[in-house]
Image (cartoon, rainbow, N blue to C red):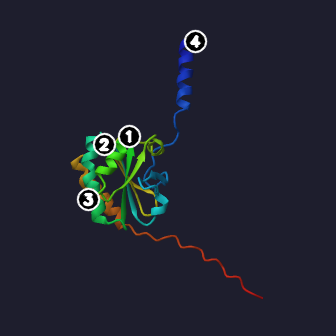
């Protein structure tokens, strides 16, 4: 009986140390940082307010991810960068592999970042790829999707169209009152 109690206590302590953050849900603000591009630009959702951001976690060894890339490229080109930005977050691949991928995708219009140590994917609670998060113009999660299949392409397209069609008013800055002389 002591062994069972000890085992249960060990399990309880182990569970207590698991990450407590949850998957960003629709309507919530997701983690802001999406990593750094090969050119050194920090990619943040907050810097892209007013446009839809499609965040795709993927890896080169993932066949479904490779099938999804041309679809994401087509979405990027159809919508234009002023309205939408697709950010590909490379999922935990070695730096050499990532550099090879960057070279192969040099003509792509997609934004690439590298999640070498899993910090970004952990923040999004991503543990498998492909994984999509669509962020609305206000910077909140508007749609999410696991996996890839050609049957789901109409759903992906409809989600992009819906988010692009949503109105967005930039927060108006509060004017600083001019000091009045006396």
* Alpha carbon separation for disc pair 1 and 2: 8 Å
* Alpha carbon separation for disc pair 2 and 4: 48 Å
Residue 145, image x, y percentages: 34, 48
Please name which of the two marks, 4 or 3, marks the residue nearer to the observer. 3
Label for residue 60? 2
* Label 4 residue SS: helix
Q: Is residue 148 visible?
A: no
* Alpha carbon separation for disc pair 3 and 1: 24 Å
- Ranked by sequence position, the earlier of labels 3 and 1 is 3
The quarter of the rendered structure image containing the C terminus is bottom right
Residue 124, image x, y percentages: 45, 46
For disc 1, the marked residue is: 93
Q: Nearer the viewer, residue 20 or 89?
A: 89
- Ranked by sequence position, the earlier of labels 4 and 1 is 4
Task: Report if the CB atoms under discs 1 and 2 are less than 8 Å apart.
Answer: yes
In terms of image quadrants, where is residue 106?
bottom left
Q: Residues within 10 Å of mark 1 (few under 14, many from 20)?
A: some
Residue plotted at (30% across, 44% down): 147
* Alpha carbon separation for disc pair 4 and 1: 44 Å
For disc 4, the marked residue is: 2
- Ranked by sequence position, the earlier of labels 1 and 2 is 2
């Amino acid at each position: 009986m002591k062994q069972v109690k000890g085992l249960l206590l060990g399990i309880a302590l182990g569970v207590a140390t698991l990450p407590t953050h949850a998957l960003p849900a629709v309507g919530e603000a997701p983690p802001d940082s999406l990593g750094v591009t090969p050119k050194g630009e920090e990619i943040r959702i907050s810097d892209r307010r007013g446009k839809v951001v499609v965040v795709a976690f993927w890896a080169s060894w993932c066949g479904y991810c490779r099938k999804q890339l041309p679809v994401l490229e087509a979405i990027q080109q159809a919508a234009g960068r002023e309205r939408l930005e697709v950010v590909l977050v490379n999922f935990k691949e070695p730096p050499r592999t990532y550099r090879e991928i960057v070279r192969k995708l040099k003509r792509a219009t997609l934004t690439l970042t590298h999640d070498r140590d899993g910090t970004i994917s952990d923040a999004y609670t991503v543990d498998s790829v492909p994984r999509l998060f669509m962020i609305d113009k206000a910077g909140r999660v508007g749609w999410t999707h696991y996996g890839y299949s050609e049957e789901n392409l109409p759903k992906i397209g409809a989600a992009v169209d819906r988010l692009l069609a949503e109105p967005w008013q930039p927060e108006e800055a509060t004017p600083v009152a001019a000091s009045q002389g006396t």
